[in-house]
Amino acid sequence: MSLLVVKPLLHIGVTKSKGMGNHPLFFIMKLLLIAFCLFFLSGFSTKQETTCLALNIYFEARDQVTKGQMAVALVTINRVNSKRFPNTICKVVKQANWKNGKVVRNRCHFSWYCDGLSDHPKDKIAWKVAVTIAKAMLELPGVHIKNFGKRWTVNDFLNGATHYHRNDVDPYWNRNMLVVATIGEHIFYVDPYR
């Protein structure tokens, strides 16, 4: 790749004696390379990561309002951004307890992943909604959410929440957490000791 980059610069009169590192085109190429690396190292770069986020939205919140589905996506993304969780969406979604090389049933961070049921979406419309929300939350080109006809930039309206549960359960881990929101049937928490 460096030959493709360097040769055109040499043709426009940039030589080693003038210092390629100071040439404006070289500077632009360095910026593009940095942006490319940051994008692909962020954990939000692949189709697989988008699919993992969409699966989490679908199985955790397909029966919730759009804001509730977005909140589940935010929790997943907040975990990726936290030092206490894995650094990719798929690793966060598939985080589980393992024994003898197998996932322990019903011992996953997101219950759908190890509940023993099929992980293939059956409701085509809900799946399309989940994929669209996942793409919008990851700010992929060409996909955005509109609010009253205007493009909506989604900020973290959960203030960094990394946990949630349905309102019909009371897990042990919520004892030392702070409630930041209740959306639909989910209660969202932030860990004050993070």
Image: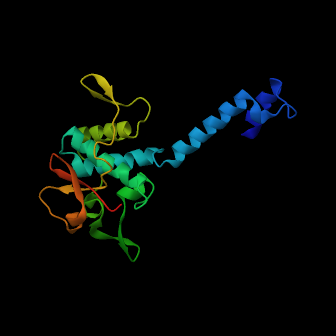
Q: Residue furthest left?
A: 168
Side (left or right) of 77 relative to 37: left
Side (left or right) of 126 relative to 15: left
Asked which quadrant contains residue 132, the reply is top left
Q: Is residue 123 above or below residue 166?
A: above
Closer to the camera in the image, 92 or 161? 161
The residue located at (38%, 46%) in the rendering is 51
Q: How many marks?
A: 0
**In the rendering, at what x and y percent does residue 101 appear?**
41, 73
Q: Quadrant of the C terminus?
A: bottom left
Q: Is residue 67 above or below residue 11?
A: below
Side (left or right) of 139 relative to 1: left
Asked which quadrant contains residue 44, the reply is top left
Q: Is residue 160 visible?
A: yes
**In the rendering, at what x and y percent does residue 179 appear?**
21, 54
Q: Residue furthest right?
A: 17
**In the rendering, at what x and y percent does residue 182 appear?**
17, 48
The residue located at (29%, 38%) in the rendering is 128
The residue located at (24%, 47%) in the rendering is 122
